[in-house]
Amino acid sequence: MAYMLSNRARVNALTENLSAAEQDSEDALNLFPNDPSLLATRGLVLFKRQQNEEALTVLSKAIEIESHHADAHWLRHLVYKALNNIEKSDLDKELAFQNKYHVGSIS
């Protein structure tokens, strides 16, 4: 159930249905609050809502739990890029690729 909610949250976030995305990501995390994939989805939703500091916190937690989480590194790269922190953005981008991130999964 949590992964279904997370997947729906990602679709909603990418299609700019942000209120539904936020609700689905919260519901998923209520079921499994320390799941790095669910945290990455929450980070995506926060990023799309331009809540970049909150997104960094959530994505960093996902990476702390699973250091090789490619989606979390890619999303954190996007957040750092939006904040013009190019050095950290480039580092996370490199880590995402090292961990087999598939370009186009999330942009």
Image: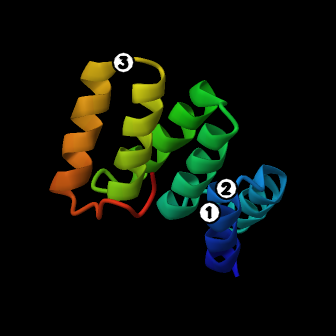
The N terminus: image quadrant: bottom right
On screen, 99 above or below 51?
below
Point out the tag, 2 or 3, that comes first from the N-terminus.
2
> Disc 3 residue type?
Asn
> Disc 1 residue type?
Arg
Of the pair 63 and 41, the residue shown nearer to us: 41
Q: Position of residue 40 (x, y in %)?
A: 52, 53
Name which residue lies at 75% across and 61% down: 30
On screen, 107 above or below 28?
above
Name which residue lies at 30% across and 59% down: 103
Q: Position of residue 15 (x, y in %)?
A: 68, 59
- Residue designated by label 1: 10
- Residue designated by label 3: 85
Secondary structure found at label 2: helix
Name which residue lies at 50% across and 62% down: 37
- Residue designated by label 2: 13
Q: Could you say which quadrant of the image residue 32 lies in?
A: bottom right
Q: Seen in the image, is 53 located left or right of residue 97? A: right
